[in-house]
Amino acid sequence: MTKAHAPPVKSLRIVIVEDEAIIALALQQALKSIGHDICAVAATAPEAISAAGQHRPDIVLMDIRLQGDQDGIFAAEAIWSRYRIRSLFLSAFDTASTHLRALTAQPLGFLAKPYRLDELRRALDGVEARSLAC
């Protein structure tokens, strides 16, 4: 078995927040292929906050730009403050000002779109290695 196909250190329970259905489906399939469990998929900030409260995942994979008036940073901040669940931002909108604003959500990091599966896997392996400590 190659390193790219090795099972994860720990299977994470993940909520995906992505407003583009095709991207959300591809991400869901990719995460399942590397051994993680998908609790829910959300397309808006209110859906994301609700899913995190209902499923209490280990991590939220959060797009920054979402449908509706509230963005992924708003959702990640609410999820962090209410449930102490951290987010890993996945976004094509990757600027210094966005990163600075997102720091209030205590993110686990940022992964620029388009991401590669090996980059996503490394980011999640880093989450596992830290044992999701706050």
Image (spheres, rainbow, N blue to C red):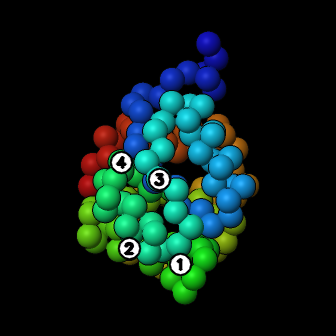
Location of residue 77 in the rendering, given as x and y in whole percent from the top left corner? 38, 73
Q: CA distance from mark 1 to mark 2?
A: 10 Å
- Nearer-N-terminus badge (4/2): 4
Mark nearest the camera among 2 and 3 is 3
Q: CA distance from mark 4 to mark 2?
A: 15 Å
Dot 4 amino acid type? Asp
Contact check, label 2 and label 3, Cβ < 8 Å:
no
Neighbour class for label 3 at 10 Å: few (<14), some, many (≥20)?
some
Location of residue 78 in the rendering, given as x and y in whole percent from the top left corner? 35, 74
Q: CA distance from mark 3 to mark 1?
A: 18 Å
Write down the residue under mark 2: 77
Location of residue 9 in the rendering, given as x and y in whole percent from the top left corner? 42, 28
Taking the spot 34% from the left edge, 53% from the top edge, the residue there is: 55
Disc on res. 101: none
- Quadrant location of residue 52? bottom left
**51 on left or right of 63:** left
Disc on res. 71: 1
Depicted 8 relative to depicted 26: above or below? above
Q: CA distance from mark 2 to mark 3?
A: 18 Å
- Nearer-N-terminus badge (4/1): 4
Whether residue 55 can be seen here: yes
- Quadrant location of residue 122? top right
Write down the residue under mark 4: 58
Q: CA distance from mark 4 to mark 3?
A: 12 Å
Contact check, label 4 and label 2, Cβ < 8 Å:
no
- Element under label 4? loop
- Nearer-N-terminus badge (1/2): 1
- What is the quadrant of the N terminus in the image? top right
Taking the spot 40% from the left edge, 52% from the top edge, the residue there is: 59
Contact check, label 4 and label 1, Cβ < 8 Å:
no
